[in-house]
Image: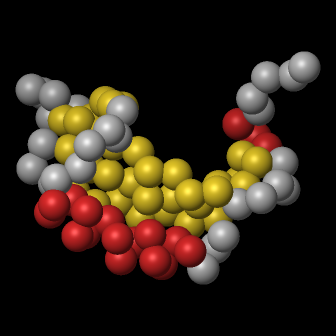
Amino acid sequence: MAGFDKALDKELFSEQLDFDRSRITVAVFAYNNGTPKLQLSRENKDASGEYNFAKLGRMTKEEVEKVMPLMEKAKKFL
């Protein structure tokens, strides 16, 4: 079985939300022309101001309130 090929992963929608020490991306991807799927990801800012990938895990109420409208927007691409 072949591994993941980034060239086959097509981004149909993507928007980022910035918070104090992190940012959350709401995106829709379709792999190899398959079923489009919603992806949520978080990046945390380190001491030097660089962003690093982190598990999204739990979200604050503020994050949820800002992410939900983007999820509604992303639904149009599913």
Q: Is residue 13 left or right of residue 15?
A: right
Q: Residue furthest right?
A: 1
Residue at horizontal 39 percent and vertical 54 percent from the top = 25
Residue 29: percent from left, percent from top: 65, 55
Task: Say left or right for 58 vs 16.
Answer: left
Q: Residue at x 46, y 77 (%)?
A: 72
Say how many tags the image has. 0
In terms of image quadrants, where is residue 13? bottom right
Which quadrant is home to the N terminus? Answer: top right
Residue that appears at 70% across and 36% down: 6
In terms of depth relative to the viewer, which is nearer, 15 or 68?
A: 68
Location of residue 65 in the rendering, given as x and y in whole percent from the top left corner: 23, 70
13 relative position to 25: left or right: right
Q: Position of residue 15 (x, y in %)?
A: 42, 64
Image position of 8 with respect to 12: above or below: above
The C terminus: image quadrant = bottom right
Closer-to-camera residue (23/58): 58
- Left or right of 64? Residue 12 is right
Q: Is residue 31 above or below residue 64?
A: above
* Relative to 34, residue 7 above or below: above
Q: Which is more toward the observer, 68 or 54?
A: 68
Residue at the (52%, 72%) spot, across then down: 74
Colour mapping used in the image: secondary structure
